[in-house]
Amino acid sequence: MKCATACRWGCDARRITRADAQEFLQTIKSLPIRLSDPVSYDGLFSMADRHGLTVYDAAYLDSAVREGLPLASLDNALCKAAGKAGHKKRWPAPLCSIIALKRLAYMHVSDLRGRKPHEISQAISLNRRNFLRTVTGAGSAAAFFGPAALRGMAASKNRKAVVVTFGGGARDDETFMPDGQENIPHLLKELVPQATFLTNVVNKGILGHYVATASIVTGVYETFNNFAAVSPNNPTVFEYYRKDLKRPATDAWVVAPSNGFARIGESGNKQYGPGLGAGVILPKRLLSAALSSASDGARYQHLLRDNYETPLYAPSLAGRQIELDQMAAVLKLSVDDFAAHARNLVSPDELSVYIARQLMRQISPSLLWITLHDIDIAHSGTFSLYVDGIKRTDRLCAELWQAIQKDPEYANKTTMFILPDFGRDSDIDSGGNGFQHHRTGDAVSRTTWMMALGPDVKQNVVVDRRVESTDLIPTLGAYFGFDARLSTGKPIAEVA
Ligand SMILES: [Zn+2]
């Protein structure tokens, strides 16, 4: 109502045209707005009276308090009243201005208006490449590598690889772009200087977390329904690895974020499939089985929520996900110790990394895949939680790399790959809702990065050429010495 009123005044005063007003109101409509009523209108009046606010402003404060949401305001009186009302979640005025200006700037990128999608995508890609190059300060890989780089590679029996998906769904804006860099101090200061950093990794597949991760794992863009309890159609990296190299079941593991990932360890392909894949550990499922009472379960909801997109989806479990008693045997961790430790953890990703580190200590698998997912809380629409997720993921990646360096089973023989499963929507696409979702399939949500670190990888090198998410598995094939024969990707010579 207030926005429409402001537009009406603007038209009357000839500050804006009717067409601009219409366009602005359409843009507002594309925001994820949910209406909520105050508990009582009398209460609203006394709140306004108490703090010397207009009833409008009291309504904002009332909904921020009731919903437990941050209050974003440039209005000093309102911010003061929020402080007095004990509402601590506030975005300070400078941050509000930056967000408002950024949105306006995006909405008025006039030189991109009317351009064709591939032109916009090229402009974005050129822009981000320049940014990414400046953050690393690294040299180009072209001088070090040619097509012959793969040839001299001998598969080593001792080699190990840890793959971490930096997810689910992180944009450049909140990571490597200038405004985002404060969220990823560990990647920027500790990991990138030791890594070969690929700045232009494109995911051309379906942007749902399970199907996209399955596409990375198989090296083929899988096309099944993201919310179906199915195995990937094409052989997974774990099957190639175990069948070609005759490795035991204990040598390949996945730690996955939600029950929907239960079948990611092995495909439905007849040449491979059952019995040849990886064991899948679903830490949240194990924790819910380990918690002794229903009230315990309610207290640890922040760890147990299965996914951030579809609260009603409850996939049936199958595949090689392990059960509580198997976990106790494999990880040599008593169920009580596991539950006690988990209770102190703040997030599902912390739980996943805890489990991954137990696996490394107890059975030291040579191929370990960890899918992080906290960032996907962005679907709730709360920007601060999304950014917290990125900061945590940044820290956890560094902790994993440190753990690798300290463990004699892994140090000096492990390559770690870190890559987001995909991005999230841009702020300029009205079909998207910006950071909250990944539904448009625009260039921003498809274009991301990857880094590789390890004794066989050049340090502080940037690779700008375009690669695809499906190239990772053939790259692991070149590294370990197996043939990812059904993958549509190509080995990335600069890191293989
Ligand atoms: Zn998501």
Image (spheres, helix red, strand yellow):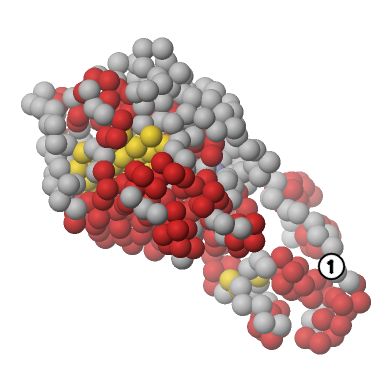
In x, y percent, where is residue 18? 79, 50
Does residue 345 appear anywhere in the picture?
Answer: no
| Residue at (52, 45) in percent of width and height | 285
Q: Residue at x 69, y 50 (%)?
A: 32
User: Residue 280 sits in which quadrant?
Assistant: top left
Q: Residue furthest top?
A: 270
Q: Residue furthest toward the right?
A: 42
| Residue 260 screen position, x and y as percent | 54, 36
Q: How far across and down, in percent of the image, does residue 52 sit?
A: 79, 86
Query: Pointer 1: residues within 10 angstroms few (<14), some, or many (20+)?
Result: few
| Left/right of residue 149 with respect to residue 57 in the rendered view | left
Screen quadrant of the N terminus: bottom right
In the displayed structure image, the side of residue 281 where residue 1 appears, left or right: right
Query: Does 14 appear above or below 326?
Result: below
The residue closer to the viewer here, 32 or 275, is 275
The C terminus: image quadrant: top left
Q: Is residue 427 above or below residue 159?
A: below
**Image check: 303 left or right of 404?**
right
- Depth order, front residue of 211/193: 211
Query: Which element type, helix, strand or loop, lies under badge 1?
Result: loop
Q: Nearer the viewer, residue 340 or 109?
A: 340
Q: Amino acid at mark 1?
A: Pro
Q: Give how far across and how far down residue 421 sits, in percent.
A: 43, 39
Does the residue tagged 1 have its C-beta within 8 Å of any atom of ligand 1?
A: no
* Relative vertical location of residue 475 with respect to residue 174 in this rendering, above or below: above
**Res 229 quadrant in image:** top right
Tell me if I can see residue 309 in this picture. Answer: yes
Figure quadrant, ligand 1? top right
Which quarter of the figure has residue 468?
top left
Q: Which residue is mark 1?
A: 38
- Residue, x 64% and y 42% (percent of image)? 310
